[in-house]
Image: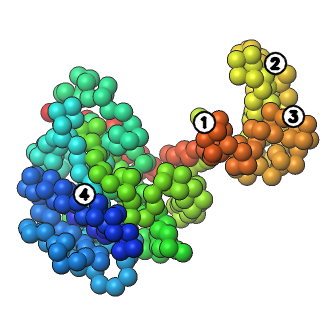
Amino acid sequence: MIVNKIYIVSWFGSRDNPDLRAKRVDFHSKQIAWAKSHNLEIIVYAQDYDPSEHIPGVMYMTHHGPVVPPGHARNKLLEHFYNTGDDFAIFADNDAVLYELPQHKDSIDFIERLQTLDIAKFTNVGIIIPLDPARTAFTKDIEKASYKNNYVFRRSSRVKGSFMFIKNIKKHCKQEPKFDEKIFVIKDGELLPGEDSDFAFTLWRMGQGTYATNHAILNEYGRNFSTWIDDDTGRYNQHIDFFVPAMNEKHGLIFLTGVGGNDLIKGFKYYGVSTHADCGTKVRFARDDVDRTKTLIRYGHTDIEFHPLPGPMQIPDMIPTLEASDLYKTNTAFQEGIDLLSGKASKQGRGHFLKLKTFTNWAVLDPQNLPVKITIPK
């Protein structure tokens, strides 16, 4: 397949923070050197650049005016890409490359390996994303025989826009999807994030899924030096408060919210507590209080107490009901547990509340029944 370009959205940050700009300029210089080492044609969408920040051997698309969000910038780059004969191209932030130390194995020359593969094997693939070692360990998987003998791509709903291989949808599907410029804007000086995942969901609707691979491993030089938001708590809050409801409103119920491993498609009908010798008294939720009680007894729980909710509810929606309940007023352990969920109390001195998790509702996201795994022999 033809993969020979990298499209980079580049802004070095506010001029009020010269130290940050200097770091980002350095990260980007390393990125350009990496791209040249793989013989990639480099196209940069440059925002608020000084003339001295241009690097020889790079094609620049210069933005004039106030800084625009990443999705807006990527759309300008997509217009160029869609009018090439390439099959895939790399779309990256200005600090992202692939790791290429010996322990990273195929990641060292993944681009060259991808270029040798038949594009026909990627009929259902719209985006390829590398493994993010900040989230997922990779060492055990790349030692397996399956890794040695095959390239493996696994269907994923998690997209990280800092480094993506995007298919030329115009060439292969006769359509030209773009990043959403209405939802993902700069509001009150903050970037509303998630345009990368939204773009992926749009491709899903076209039968072009997102696939992750351990054969490429992401390396972000400036992960802790973001131009938009600089802490994981801030990213998490934006994810829960803005991104999840926005995506569910636009695409259908893609995300379900819960705690731990709970699948909340139908919601819970009961709340309560139980006590175990190893973990003390904890908050419990149940769809069926009788079955849940039997299960808890089987695992050695005592002092089990359940109360009905007004109707099936997901955990975030039931917080007001729980806080108004008699159990909240009379049971200290229950009150502490609900305060953790609502954000009124910290856990083990960490200063933040017990995080709600989001789960993918595959029935909504995958109407095309795309393959869960694609295996290509080496």
Q: Return the disc, 1 or 4, that comes first in the chain's sequence.
A: 4
Q: Return the disc, 2 or 3, that comes first in the chain's sequence.
A: 2
Q: Return the disc, 1 or 2, that comes first in the chain's sequence.
A: 1
| Alpha carbon distance from label 2 to label 3 | 15 Å
Q: Which residue is mark 2?
A: 302
Q: Nearer the viewer, mark 4 or mark 3?
A: 4
**Crowdedness near tag 1: few (<14), some (14–19) or many (≥20) residues, C-alpha within 10 Å:** few
Q: Are marks 1 and 2 in contact (CB under 8 Å)?
A: no
Q: What amino acid does circle 2 point to? A: Thr
Whether residue 252 is visible to the viewer of this picture, yes or no, is no
Picture quarter containing residue 306?
A: top right
Q: Nearer the viewer, mark 1 or mark 4?
A: 4
Q: What amino acid does circle 1 point to? A: Gly
**Crowdedness near tag 4: few (<14), some (14–19) or many (≥20) residues, C-alpha within 10 Å:** some
| Alpha carbon distance from label 1 to label 2 | 22 Å
Mark carried by residue 331: 3
Q: Nearer the viewer, mark 2 or mark 3?
A: 3
| Alpha carbon distance from label 4 to label 2 | 56 Å
Q: Which residue is mark 4?
A: 27
**In the displayed structure, would residue 56 be above or below residue 362?**
below
**In the displayed structure, would residue 150 be above or below residue 94?**
above
> In the current view of this chain or complex, which residue is farthest to the bottom?
65
